[in-house]
Image: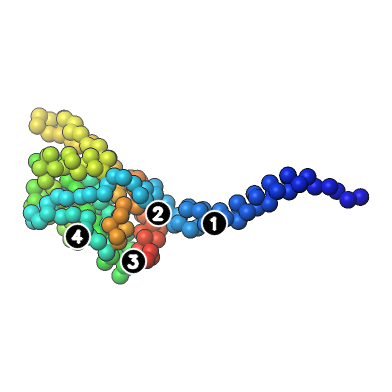
């Protein structure tokens, strides 16, 4: 016996099939955009500008690093754990990339300008990777830069008189070779995940 199909149901089924067929053309579906491990913030309306002097007094902007995948991390040299472990991880990932590591740029922004003098910053960077750039500035410059990046930081009194630590956002911003912010890497994500994402960005067409 023939089974009669409701015409409306047939039209709905056809429309659903057409929608599914086109899903692979939608952003983030079907592999049309990279599957990053970190938080994808492509197109974010923050972390777009950076203008601070480096340890040699030279004013630096994101444009200086165009052509390289750039990782920007806020911290301070007397940080006991998060900062050294993050910078060590960035340096290790750069080495793991082999020749492509030359296309990677680490940028450290100090949130403790009173103690992080140019000399201190130069020595600190050398202990991780001499190619990494350290940026500093006046308290007001740091405040404005942190605001642009939505980075939190605050001084906490230490155990002895005059001592203090600085609580701060523990994460790394990643910019592609065109200088566009693309990822936010949370602290503790791991070297393997970061390496995966950087390889994807390095493989993108730079045009």
Query: Which residue is denoted by mark 1 in the rendering?
Result: 24
Residue 47 vertical position relative to residue 153 in the rendered view, above or below:
below
Q: Residue extending furthest front?
A: 7
Q: CA distance from mark 1 to mark 4?
A: 36 Å
First in residue order: circle 2 vs circle 3: 2
Query: Which residue is denoted by mark 3 in the rendering?
Result: 207
Q: CA distance from mark 1 to mark 3?
A: 23 Å
First in residue order: circle 1 vs circle 4: 1
Q: Position of residue 175 (x, y in %)?
A: 30, 55
Quadrant of the image occupied by residue 66: bottom left
Using a 10 Å C-alpha cutoff, classify the residue at mark 3 as few (fewer than 14 neighbours), some (14 to 19) or many (20 or more).
Answer: few
SS category of the residue bearing label 2: helix
Mark in the foreground, 2 or 3: 3
Q: What residue is at 64 percent from the left and 49 percent from the top?
A: 16
Nearest the eye: 7 or 201 = 7
First in residue order: circle 1 vs circle 3: 1
Query: Which residue is denoted by mark 4 in the rendering?
Result: 64
Q: CA distance from mark 3 to mark 4?
A: 17 Å
Q: CA distance from mark 2 to mark 3?
A: 25 Å
Find out whether the residues at labels 2 and 3 contact each other: C-beta distance under 8 Å.
Answer: no
- For residue 193, the mark is 2
Horizontal side of residue 28 vs 63, given as left or right: right
Q: Position of residue 37 (x, y in %)?
A: 42, 51
Q: What residue is at 36 percent from the left and 60 percent from the top?
A: 201
């Amino acid at each position: 016996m023939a089974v009669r199909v409701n015409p409306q149901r047939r039209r709905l089924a056809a429309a659903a099939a057409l929608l599914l067929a086109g899903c692979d053309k939608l952003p983030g579906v079907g592999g049309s955009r990279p599957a990053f491990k970190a938080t994808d913030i492509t197109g974010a309306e923050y972390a777009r500008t950076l203008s601070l002097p480096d340890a040699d007094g030279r004013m630096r902007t994101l444009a200086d690093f165009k052509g390289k995948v750039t990782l920007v991390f806020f911290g301070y040299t007397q940080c006991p754990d998060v900062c050294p472990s993050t910078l060590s991880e960035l340096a290790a990932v750069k080495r793991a990339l082999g020749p492509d590591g030359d296309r990677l740029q680490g940028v450290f922004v100090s949130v403790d300008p009173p103690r992080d003098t140019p000399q201190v910053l130069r020595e600190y960077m050398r202990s991780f990777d001499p190619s990494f750039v350290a940026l500093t500035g006046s308290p007001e410059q740091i405040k404005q830069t942190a605001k642009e990046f939505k980075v939190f930081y605050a001084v906490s009194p230490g155990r002895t008189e005059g001592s203090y630590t600085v609580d701060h956002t523990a994460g790394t911003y990643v910019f592609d070779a065109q200088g566009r912010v693309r990822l936010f890497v949370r602290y503790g994500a791991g070297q393997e995940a970061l390496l995966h994402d950087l390889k994807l960005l390095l493989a993108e067409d730079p045009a």
